[in-house]
Image (cartoon, grey):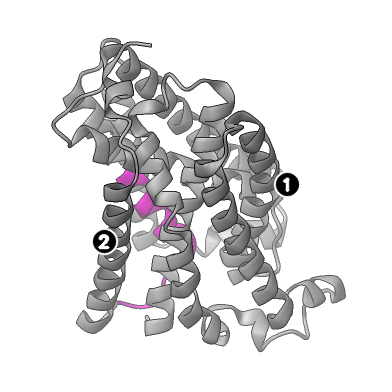
Protein backbone atom coordinates (compact mmCIF):
# COMPACT_ATOMS: atom_id res chain seq x y z
CA UNK A 1 0.00 0.00 0.00
CA UNK A 2 1.39 3.40 -0.97
CA UNK A 3 1.18 6.56 1.14
CA UNK A 4 -1.31 7.97 -1.36
CA UNK A 5 -3.56 4.94 -1.02
CA UNK A 6 -3.34 5.04 2.78
CA UNK A 7 -4.46 8.68 2.77
CA UNK A 8 -7.17 7.84 0.24
CA UNK A 9 -8.66 5.15 2.49
CA UNK A 10 -8.69 7.54 5.47
CA UNK A 11 -10.23 10.27 3.29
CA UNK A 12 -13.03 8.00 2.07
CA UNK A 13 -13.78 6.77 5.59
CA UNK A 14 -13.80 10.18 7.28
CA UNK A 15 -15.67 11.89 4.46
CA UNK A 16 -18.26 9.13 4.67
CA UNK A 17 -18.82 9.88 8.36
CA UNK A 18 -19.13 13.62 7.69
CA UNK A 19 -21.53 13.15 4.77
CA UNK A 20 -23.45 10.50 6.69
CA UNK A 21 -23.82 12.95 9.57
CA UNK A 22 -25.39 15.46 7.22
CA UNK A 23 -27.79 12.81 5.92
CA UNK A 24 -28.89 11.84 9.44
CA UNK A 25 -29.24 15.50 10.47
CA UNK A 26 -31.45 16.40 7.52
CA UNK A 27 -33.64 13.31 7.96
CA UNK A 28 -33.86 13.94 11.69
CA UNK A 29 -34.95 17.56 11.23
CA UNK A 30 -37.52 16.56 8.64
CA UNK A 31 -39.04 13.73 10.67
CA UNK A 32 -38.84 14.73 14.32
CA UNK A 33 -36.43 16.40 16.73
CA UNK A 34 -37.32 13.96 19.52
CA UNK A 35 -34.88 11.16 18.68
CA UNK A 36 -32.24 13.49 17.19
CA UNK A 37 -31.56 15.63 20.28
CA UNK A 38 -29.10 13.30 22.11
CA UNK A 39 -26.77 13.01 19.11
CA UNK A 40 -27.41 16.33 17.39
CA UNK A 41 -24.24 17.96 18.74
CA UNK A 42 -22.07 15.03 17.62
CA UNK A 43 -23.60 14.95 14.14
CA UNK A 44 -23.22 18.70 13.70
CA UNK A 45 -19.59 18.57 14.82
CA UNK A 46 -18.77 15.73 12.42
CA UNK A 47 -20.40 17.53 9.49
CA UNK A 48 -18.53 20.75 10.32
CA UNK A 49 -15.19 18.97 9.79
CA UNK A 50 -15.87 19.02 6.05
CA UNK A 51 -13.44 21.94 5.37
CA UNK A 52 -10.63 19.88 6.94
CA UNK A 53 -11.56 16.95 4.71
CA UNK A 54 -11.27 19.22 1.69
CA UNK A 55 -7.63 19.79 2.69
CA UNK A 56 -7.06 16.09 3.44
CA UNK A 57 -8.31 15.28 -0.05
CA UNK A 58 -5.45 17.15 -1.71
CA UNK A 59 -2.76 14.40 -1.40
CA UNK A 60 -4.99 11.70 -2.97
CA UNK A 61 -5.96 14.18 -5.69
CA UNK A 62 -2.28 14.64 -6.55
CA UNK A 63 -1.84 10.87 -6.91
CA UNK A 64 -4.90 9.89 -8.96
CA UNK A 65 -2.81 7.66 -11.21
CA UNK A 66 -1.93 5.48 -8.19
CA UNK A 67 -5.58 5.05 -7.15
CA UNK A 68 -7.65 4.81 -10.32
CA UNK A 69 -6.64 2.73 -13.36
CA UNK A 70 -8.69 4.88 -15.75
CA UNK A 71 -6.16 7.72 -15.41
CA UNK A 72 -3.60 5.83 -17.52
CA UNK A 73 -5.70 3.07 -19.13
CA UNK A 74 -8.43 4.81 -21.08
CA UNK A 75 -8.46 3.01 -24.42
CA UNK A 76 -10.84 0.24 -23.39
CA UNK A 77 -13.44 2.52 -21.73
CA UNK A 78 -16.67 3.49 -23.54
CA UNK A 79 -16.37 7.05 -24.92
CA UNK A 80 -18.94 8.62 -22.59
CA UNK A 81 -17.47 6.94 -19.51
CA UNK A 82 -13.96 7.95 -20.56
CA UNK A 83 -15.12 11.57 -20.85
CA UNK A 84 -16.90 11.39 -17.49
CA UNK A 85 -13.80 9.95 -15.81
CA UNK A 86 -11.33 12.45 -17.20
CA UNK A 87 -9.02 13.62 -14.37
CA UNK A 88 -9.92 17.29 -14.65
CA UNK A 89 -13.67 16.69 -14.60
CA UNK A 90 -13.23 14.16 -11.77
CA UNK A 91 -11.40 16.69 -9.58
CA UNK A 92 -13.97 19.39 -10.34
CA UNK A 93 -16.80 17.08 -9.28
CA UNK A 94 -14.97 16.02 -6.13
CA UNK A 95 -14.36 19.63 -5.09
CA UNK A 96 -18.03 20.40 -5.81
CA UNK A 97 -19.20 17.54 -3.58
CA UNK A 98 -17.05 18.70 -0.67
CA UNK A 99 -17.83 22.41 -1.04
CA UNK A 100 -21.60 21.83 -1.25
CA UNK A 101 -21.53 19.56 1.80
CA UNK A 102 -19.42 22.07 3.75
CA UNK A 103 -21.80 24.87 2.81
CA UNK A 104 -24.80 22.75 3.72
CA UNK A 105 -23.32 21.94 7.15
CA UNK A 106 -22.81 25.63 8.01
CA UNK A 107 -26.20 26.59 6.58
CA UNK A 108 -27.97 23.90 8.59
CA UNK A 109 -26.61 25.02 11.96
CA UNK A 110 -27.25 28.74 11.35
CA UNK A 111 -30.66 28.83 9.71
CA UNK A 112 -33.90 29.45 11.58
CA UNK A 113 -35.83 27.42 9.00
CA UNK A 114 -34.35 24.04 9.83
CA UNK A 115 -37.00 21.88 8.17
CA UNK A 116 -36.96 23.85 4.92
CA UNK A 117 -33.15 23.81 4.82
CA UNK A 118 -33.12 20.08 5.54
CA UNK A 119 -35.51 19.41 2.66
CA UNK A 120 -33.21 21.30 0.28
CA UNK A 121 -30.16 19.64 1.81
CA UNK A 122 -31.52 16.12 1.46
CA UNK A 123 -32.47 16.79 -2.16
CA UNK A 124 -28.87 17.89 -2.84
CA UNK A 125 -27.20 15.20 -0.74
CA UNK A 126 -28.95 12.30 -2.46
CA UNK A 127 -27.28 12.74 -5.88
CA UNK A 128 -24.04 14.05 -4.37
CA UNK A 129 -23.53 11.00 -2.15
CA UNK A 130 -24.47 8.64 -4.99
CA UNK A 131 -22.06 10.21 -7.49
CA UNK A 132 -19.32 10.54 -4.87
CA UNK A 133 -19.64 6.80 -4.14
CA UNK A 134 -19.22 6.04 -7.82
CA UNK A 135 -16.35 8.50 -8.34
CA UNK A 136 -14.35 7.77 -5.20
CA UNK A 137 -15.05 4.05 -4.74
CA UNK A 138 -16.69 2.19 -7.62
CA UNK A 139 -14.56 3.83 -10.33
CA UNK A 140 -11.53 2.01 -8.93
CA UNK A 141 -12.86 -0.71 -11.24
CA UNK A 142 -14.47 1.47 -13.93
CA UNK A 143 -15.97 -1.16 -16.20
CA UNK A 144 -18.95 -1.86 -13.95
CA UNK A 145 -21.62 0.69 -13.07
CA UNK A 146 -24.23 -0.12 -10.41
CA UNK A 147 -27.17 2.23 -9.95
CA UNK A 148 -27.80 0.73 -6.48
CA UNK A 149 -24.21 1.07 -5.25
CA UNK A 150 -24.46 4.80 -4.45
CA UNK A 151 -27.63 4.31 -2.40
CA UNK A 152 -26.13 1.35 -0.51
CA UNK A 153 -22.89 3.21 0.20
CA UNK A 154 -24.84 6.29 1.35
CA UNK A 155 -26.87 4.16 3.75
CA UNK A 156 -23.65 2.67 5.12
CA UNK A 157 -22.27 6.19 5.65
CA UNK A 158 -25.42 7.24 7.52
CA UNK A 159 -25.21 4.09 9.66
CA UNK A 160 -21.56 4.79 10.54
CA UNK A 161 -22.34 8.43 11.36
CA UNK A 162 -25.27 7.57 13.63
CA UNK A 163 -23.38 4.72 15.31
CA UNK A 164 -20.37 6.96 15.92
CA UNK A 165 -22.52 9.78 17.29
CA UNK A 166 -24.35 7.39 19.65
CA UNK A 167 -21.07 5.89 20.83
CA UNK A 168 -19.56 9.31 21.60
CA UNK A 169 -22.74 10.54 23.31
CA UNK A 170 -23.31 7.50 25.51
CA UNK A 171 -19.71 7.45 26.68
CA UNK A 172 -20.38 10.84 28.27
CA UNK A 173 -21.65 10.85 31.88
CA UNK A 174 -25.03 12.55 31.28
CA UNK A 175 -27.41 9.97 29.73
CA UNK A 176 -30.32 10.68 27.41
CA UNK A 177 -33.87 10.17 28.64
CA UNK A 178 -35.23 6.60 28.30
CA UNK A 179 -37.74 7.73 25.66
CA UNK A 180 -35.07 9.31 23.51
CA UNK A 181 -32.77 6.32 24.06
CA UNK A 182 -35.47 4.00 22.72
CA UNK A 183 -35.94 6.23 19.67
CA UNK A 184 -32.21 6.19 18.97
CA UNK A 185 -32.14 2.42 19.30
CA UNK A 186 -34.96 2.05 16.74
CA UNK A 187 -33.26 4.47 14.34
CA UNK A 188 -29.93 2.63 14.57
CA UNK A 189 -31.54 -0.79 14.21
CA UNK A 190 -33.59 0.34 11.22
CA UNK A 191 -30.51 1.73 9.47
CA UNK A 192 -28.53 -1.43 10.22
CA UNK A 193 -31.18 -3.74 8.78
CA UNK A 194 -31.75 -1.50 5.75
CA UNK A 195 -28.01 -1.32 5.03
CA UNK A 196 -27.58 -5.10 5.15
CA UNK A 197 -30.66 -5.65 3.00
CA UNK A 198 -29.53 -3.12 0.36
CA UNK A 199 -26.07 -4.70 -0.01
CA UNK A 200 -27.70 -8.12 -0.20
CA UNK A 201 -30.19 -6.88 -2.82
CA UNK A 202 -27.30 -5.66 -4.98
CA UNK A 203 -25.60 -9.05 -4.70
CA UNK A 204 -28.83 -10.87 -5.67
CA UNK A 205 -29.29 -8.59 -8.70
CA UNK A 206 -25.71 -9.29 -9.84
CA UNK A 207 -26.10 -13.02 -9.22
CA UNK A 208 -29.36 -13.22 -11.20
CA UNK A 209 -28.03 -11.14 -14.10
CA UNK A 210 -24.75 -13.13 -14.17
CA UNK A 211 -22.97 -10.52 -16.30
CA UNK A 212 -19.18 -10.90 -16.53
CA UNK A 213 -18.23 -7.36 -15.45
CA UNK A 214 -20.55 -7.33 -12.43
CA UNK A 215 -19.70 -10.89 -11.39
CA UNK A 216 -16.00 -10.09 -11.78
CA UNK A 217 -16.28 -7.32 -9.18
CA UNK A 218 -17.38 -9.90 -6.61
CA UNK A 219 -14.95 -12.57 -7.81
CA UNK A 220 -12.03 -10.22 -7.17
CA UNK A 221 -13.23 -10.05 -3.55
CA UNK A 222 -13.62 -13.78 -3.01
CA UNK A 223 -10.13 -14.97 -2.02
CA UNK A 224 -9.71 -16.41 1.52
CA UNK A 225 -8.58 -13.10 3.05
CA UNK A 226 -11.51 -11.19 1.56
CA UNK A 227 -13.99 -13.89 2.51
CA UNK A 228 -12.70 -13.75 6.08
CA UNK A 229 -13.00 -9.97 6.13
CA UNK A 230 -16.54 -10.08 4.76
CA UNK A 231 -17.54 -12.83 7.20
CA UNK A 232 -16.13 -10.83 10.11
CA UNK A 233 -18.03 -7.72 9.01
CA UNK A 234 -21.37 -9.50 8.89
CA UNK A 235 -20.74 -11.30 12.18
CA UNK A 236 -20.15 -7.86 13.71
CA UNK A 237 -23.42 -6.62 12.21
CA UNK A 238 -25.26 -9.70 13.45
CA UNK A 239 -23.89 -9.02 16.92
CA UNK A 240 -25.10 -5.40 16.72
CA UNK A 241 -28.58 -6.49 15.66
CA UNK A 242 -28.79 -9.14 18.41
CA UNK A 243 -27.81 -6.52 20.98
CA UNK A 244 -30.25 -3.89 19.71
CA UNK A 245 -33.34 -6.03 19.00
CA UNK A 246 -34.58 -6.64 22.60
CA UNK A 247 -37.02 -4.03 23.90
CA UNK A 248 -36.00 -1.84 26.82
CA UNK A 249 -32.45 -1.51 25.53
CA UNK A 250 -29.92 -0.27 28.09
CA UNK A 251 -27.17 2.30 27.83
CA UNK A 252 -24.54 -0.46 27.81
CA UNK A 253 -26.35 -2.21 24.96
CA UNK A 254 -26.48 1.05 23.01
CA UNK A 255 -22.71 1.48 23.42
CA UNK A 256 -22.07 -2.13 22.41
CA UNK A 257 -24.48 -2.09 19.47
CA UNK A 258 -23.16 1.18 18.06
CA UNK A 259 -19.53 0.04 18.45
CA UNK A 260 -20.27 -3.22 16.62
CA UNK A 261 -22.10 -1.35 13.83
CA UNK A 262 -19.14 1.01 13.47
CA UNK A 263 -16.70 -1.91 13.28
CA UNK A 264 -18.94 -3.54 10.67
CA UNK A 265 -18.76 -0.42 8.53
CA UNK A 266 -14.98 -0.26 8.79
CA UNK A 267 -14.37 -3.88 7.84
CA UNK A 268 -16.97 -3.86 5.07
CA UNK A 269 -15.51 -0.66 3.60
CA UNK A 270 -12.04 -2.24 3.56
CA UNK A 271 -13.52 -5.23 1.73
CA UNK A 272 -14.97 -2.88 -0.89
CA UNK A 273 -11.91 -0.65 -1.30
CA UNK A 274 -9.42 -3.53 -1.58
CA UNK A 275 -6.23 -1.78 -0.38
CA UNK A 276 -3.14 -3.18 -2.03
CA UNK A 277 -0.53 -4.90 0.10
CA UNK A 278 0.34 -4.67 3.79
CA UNK A 279 1.06 -1.21 5.15
CA UNK A 280 4.42 -0.33 6.64
CA UNK A 281 4.64 1.10 10.13
CA UNK A 282 5.16 4.54 8.63
CA UNK A 283 1.95 4.28 6.64
CA UNK A 284 0.05 2.95 9.65
CA UNK A 285 1.37 5.91 11.64
CA UNK A 286 0.28 8.27 8.88
CA UNK A 287 -3.23 6.78 8.90
CA UNK A 288 -3.51 7.03 12.68
CA UNK A 289 -2.08 10.55 12.68
CA UNK A 290 -4.61 11.70 10.09
CA UNK A 291 -7.47 10.15 12.05
CA UNK A 292 -6.20 11.83 15.24
CA UNK A 293 -6.11 15.17 13.42
CA UNK A 294 -9.73 14.72 12.39
CA UNK A 295 -10.72 13.65 15.93
CA UNK A 296 -8.98 16.74 17.34
CA UNK A 297 -10.96 18.94 14.94
CA UNK A 298 -14.16 17.10 15.92
CA UNK A 299 -13.48 17.68 19.64
CA UNK A 300 -12.64 21.34 19.04
CA UNK A 301 -15.94 21.87 17.24
CA UNK A 302 -17.82 20.00 19.98
CA UNK A 303 -16.43 22.37 22.61
CA UNK A 304 -17.69 25.51 20.88
CA UNK A 305 -21.06 24.13 19.77
CA UNK A 306 -24.21 23.77 21.93
CA UNK A 307 -24.45 20.38 23.64
CA UNK A 308 -28.29 20.13 23.69
CA UNK A 309 -27.79 18.20 26.96
CA UNK A 310 -30.86 19.65 28.65
CA UNK A 311 -33.08 18.78 25.72
CA UNK A 312 -31.60 15.30 25.45
CA UNK A 313 -32.18 14.48 29.13
CA UNK A 314 -35.83 15.61 29.09
CA UNK A 315 -38.66 13.41 27.85
CA UNK A 316 -40.23 14.72 24.63
Vertical placement of 300 versus 54: above or below?
above
Q: Where the C terminus falls, by quadrant? A: top left
Vertical placement of 296 versus 232: above or below?
below
Question: Which label lies toward us, 2 or 1?
Answer: 2
SS type, badge 1: helix
Q: Which residue is mark 1?
A: 209
Vertical placement of 282 versus 306: above or below?
below
Q: CA distance from mark 2 to mark 1?
A: 46 Å
Instruction: Give the left or right position of residue 48, taking residue 261 as reference.
Output: right
User: On residue 296, which mark appears?
Assistant: 2
As rendered, which of 70 and 295 lies closer to the eye?
295
Instruction: Give the left or right position of residue 113, taking residue 262 as reference.
Output: right
Image quadrant where residue 90 sits = bottom right
As rendered, which of 298 and 276 lies closer to the eye?
298
Residue positioned 35% across, 53% down in the render: 267
Instruction: Give the left or right position of residue 5, taking residue 169 as reference.
Output: right
As rendered, which of 20 and 44 lies closer to the eye?
44
Question: Badge 1: how crowded within 10 Å, few (<14), some, or many (20+)?
Answer: few
Amino acid sequence: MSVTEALYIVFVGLTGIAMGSLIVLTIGHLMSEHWLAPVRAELEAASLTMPLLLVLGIPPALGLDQLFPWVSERADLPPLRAAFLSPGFFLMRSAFYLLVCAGMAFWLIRTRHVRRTSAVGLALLTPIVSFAAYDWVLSREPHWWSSLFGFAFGLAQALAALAGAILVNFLKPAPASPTRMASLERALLTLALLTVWTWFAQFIIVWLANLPLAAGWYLRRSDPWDQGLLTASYLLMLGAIVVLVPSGVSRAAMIGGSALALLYHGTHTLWILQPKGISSWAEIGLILGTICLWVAAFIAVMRVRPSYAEEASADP
